Amino acid sequence: MTPTPMTQTPIPAKTRIAVRDVSKTYERPGRRGETFTALTDVSLDIAEGEFISLIGASGCGKTTLLRMISGLIPTSGGEIKINAKRVDGVPDQVGFVFQEPALLPWRTVRDNLAFALQRRRLPAAEVQAAIDDKLQLTSLQDFAGYYPQALSGGMQQRVGLARALVGDPDVLLMDEPLSALDAFTRRRLQEEIAGILGSIGATTILVTHDVDEAVFFSDRIVVMSSSPGSVREIVDVPLARPRRHADVVGNPEAAKVRDHVLSLVLGLH
């Protein structure tokens, strides 16, 4: 008698980031006592190792949500947890890549990375080992002694990524980090970043206005609506990661996702 094959139930992915009923209100400039709501009732679970993109029209609250997850600004309502701990201030386990690299011009590449570890008060040997590791990971080992002004825009943004990763964060947050680059540099860096993040497994959230970029990187795309900002739809991207552009260009599944997300952003659905 042939034994019946056993099926194994997949182990559910651990939730790395939990966003629960989050809202954000601001006081209107010059109008004392008047407020406007930037975000309302945003709820989202992001699994360990997942890559999520936030996309939507300008003013939909993408960057506001990202900054609340990072602890840079507080929520007005609801709560955000990372590793089951409520975000209250900037957590140590979060790395942030900004739209502009914001490197210290008087510090070398190595010293910019060292600055990111300063508050941890690690032994000098441990600091240098961590820096060497991330310089190697981002192919910057030959530029460690350079100052930012000697580097191209793409190289500076790569330093910004290395700085965000030097503390081995569980969560990486990226706010349109490639938007200022030309199209060719941007595509090359997209592939490099995809490979780097695929090797370290950090949970990543990207804010972007570029639908193609969101499709290229993401496991899921969170499409946001405006006035006030909220989650309109979460779209799965059924392609293995990390990706190359050759995996996406001409791929019918990628095209289907792109067209659907674009129609949502443009309000055609």
Image (spheres, rainbow, N blue to C red):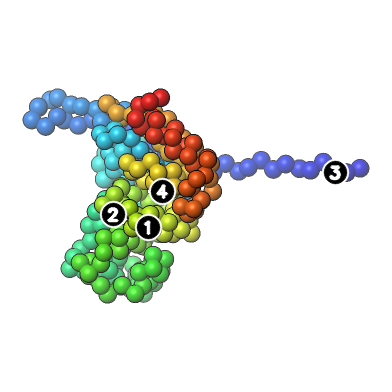
Q: Nearer the viewer, residue 172 or 269?
A: 269
Q: Residues within 10 Å of mark 1 (few under 14, many from 20)?
A: some
Q: Which residue carries the number 1 mark?
A: 189
Decide which of 5, 220 is in the foreground and name it. Answer: 220
Disc on the earlier residue, 2 or 4: 2
Q: Earlier in the sequence, mark 2 or mark 3?
A: 3
Element under disc 3 = loop
Q: Which mark is residue 181?
A: 2
Mark 3 and mark 1: Cα distance apart in space: 51 Å
User: Identity of the amino acid at label 1?
Assistant: Leu
Residue 3, which numbered label? 3
Task: Look at mark 4 in the image and give the residue it sits on.
Answer: 204
Estimate how packed mark 2 is, as few (under 14), some (14 to 19) or many (20 or more) residues with alpha carbons within 10 Å: some
N-terminal-most mark, 1 or 4: 1
Residue shown at the point (30%, 47%) measured from the top left = 175
The type of residue carrying mark 2 is Leu
SS state under label 1: helix
Residue at (44% x, 47% y) in the render: 216
Cα distance in 3D space between marks 3 and 4: 43 Å
Image point (76%, 43%), residue name: 6
> Mark 3 or 1, which is nearer the eye?
1
The disc labelled 4 sits on which kind of residue?
A: Thr
Tell me where residue 112 appears, x and y as whole percent. Answer: 26, 65
User: Disc 4 on helix, strand or loop?
Assistant: strand
Q: At numbered mark 2, what does the secondary structure look like: helix, strand or loop?
A: loop
Return the disc, 3 or 4, that comes first in the chain's sequence: 3
Query: Could one spot residue 119 in this view of the protein?
Result: no
